[in-house]
Amino acid sequence: MSWSSGFAFFSKLRFKAALWYLVLFAASSVLLFFLVSRYVANDMLRGADWLLESTVRDLAATYLTGKNTARYGQQIPLAEVPRMELAAFRARFPGIRPLIAYRSEVGDQTFHTLFGSRWRELYEFRLESDGRAYSRLLNPEQNLPFLRKEFEDKLQSFGSDNIYFRFRRPDGPAFESNGLRKGGGDTAGSGLSTVTEDGRRFRVMTLSLFDGSVIEAGRSLRDMDERLAAYTRLFLVFLAAVLTLGAGAGYLVAWRLTSGIERVSDAARRIADGDLSQRVGAKHESDEIDRLVDAFNAMSENNEALVTELRTVTDDIAHDLRTPLTRIRGMAEVTAAGETSPDGFREMCGAVAEECDSMMQLINEMLEITRTESAIDRLERSEFSLSGLVQQAGALFCEIAEDRNVALAVSVPEQEIAIRADKLKIQRMTANLLDNALKFTPPGGRVELTLALRNGAPVLEVRDTGCGISPAEKEKIFKRFYRCDASRTLPGNGLGLAMVQAIAHAHRARIEVESEPGKGSCFSVIFPQNT
Ligand code: ADP
């Protein structure tokens, strides 16, 4: 492949469509992956967060209460503690901050134990059934062994080395469940955060307690990261497959869409090179391409017909002009070479003028047909009686008919028919048809010129008992210069019917021909109803 053809490929619609498909597929896949992976990561993180939060709250309860369930009962939310008991607790220790509450059932009696902090001190409070309040100052440091134990228990119950717990007092002991995380201890305040340490990510929950102690639980996100990395790898494989497929599909679709266009443009190029017979084969690819192919073929058909006709017409004109020109030249030569008297010159001049007239007539007729066909000559429409025109034509051709010993019958309906048309042209058309009928009908024959109304439309009919026209020639008689074999010996130039057709079409009229060789012909001009 040469450089230029290589570049040509890149500018092709197929390549561009494949590229577009590729970009589209890639963009939508990446967006989809981004959304899905974000959702999955968030979901995993939410699960981890919930676990860490509940674990840290559990550990905090152990630090505060030693987790003495036998003594305190079940931990409950502070909102479930009766208001009166909460009020009594606050009354005994003004400025206290309730931290945690327990509920126990003894017989049919319910007791609530409240824990709260004030000035970094921890108090326990209970309202007995007889209304006496019981309270004491606690030393949570005593609960540290329980907390250590809880660290171990939780580690075991999670059965995972991905999690750790830590406890530290601001000025006292600090311990941790395992050495999963090296650094840290600097996480200020309470809450969740993600920490990266030596390239490993941890999700950490810290809870600052009333006395400045901090409980921390953390989870390595290695599992999650590995899972996301596996998803990413899977996605990349999927993306590669999607991109290959997308590019392939784009190329194929564009190839299918453009192959019709390429076939049309190939044919157009070959036509431009001079081969007018080129057509595009129908492949039924899509409606649009089929329509393009049909329109192109119809246009090529018309163009070829036009060019062929033009060539024929040019040939015919050349031929028709050459004969009189040759005659003129012959006459001039003979006159020049011979003993020429003034009479001889006069005779020659008369003959030359006659030949020139017939050439002029041919050229004028050609021009008129072309002008009428292409509507350059606008119709001079006026309202006139078609019945009258037909009768006049009959009267005009009566003498010629008599000379040729042909009976001419004219028939018009009683009710006069008037039309709005170019009277001169309609006269011309009628005369041409009548002239032909009389010309091609042998002596003793009959010609009928009839005007009638058929389904409300005026119909002009010229019927004769002449030589008739064979079915094969019937198709061609309206072409310029066409003359049937049987009539070549008779005068004429083959332009009469071309003129008839041009005039009829200019008036949106239709021509019908019925003919049987040896029996006669009938030419009908059917005008539109509201002419
Ligand atoms: P022209 O009459 O000058 O030959 P036209 O264009 O009028 O040319 O007619 C074309 C040909 O059609 C004629 O040469 C003739 O062969 C045929 N034709 C036309 N009218 C008739 C007719 N009424 N009967 C038989 N043949 C006809």
Image (tube, rainbow, N blue to C red):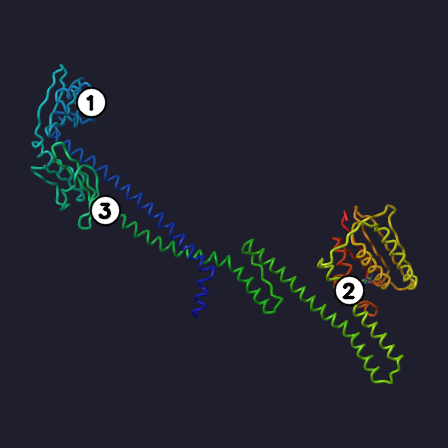
Identify which amino acid the numbered label 2 is placed on.
Glu
Pick the front one: 450 or 65: 450
Q: How dense is the environment of label 1, judged by Cα within 10 Å: few (below 14), some, or many (20 and up)?
A: some
Spatial CA distance of label 3 from label 1 is 41 Å
Which percent across, then down, holds residue 31? 36, 48
Residue in the picture at 12% in, 45% down: 179
Q: Is the C-beta separation of discs 3 and 1 under 8 Å?
A: no
Quadrant in the rendering for residue 523: bottom right
Which percent across, then down, holds residue 372? 74, 59
- Identify the mark nearer the N-term, 3 or 2: 3
Q: How dense is the environment of label 2, judged by Cα within 10 Å: few (below 14), some, or many (20 and up)?
A: some
Helix, strand or loop under label 3: helix
Q: Which residue is mark 1?
A: 81
Q: Quadrant of the N terminus?
A: bottom left
Q: Which residue is mark 2?
A: 365
Nearest-to-viewer mark from 3 and 2? 2
Identify which amino acid the numbered label 3 is placed on.
Asp
Quadrant of ligand 1 in image:
bottom right
Residue in the picture at 76% in, 58% down: 501
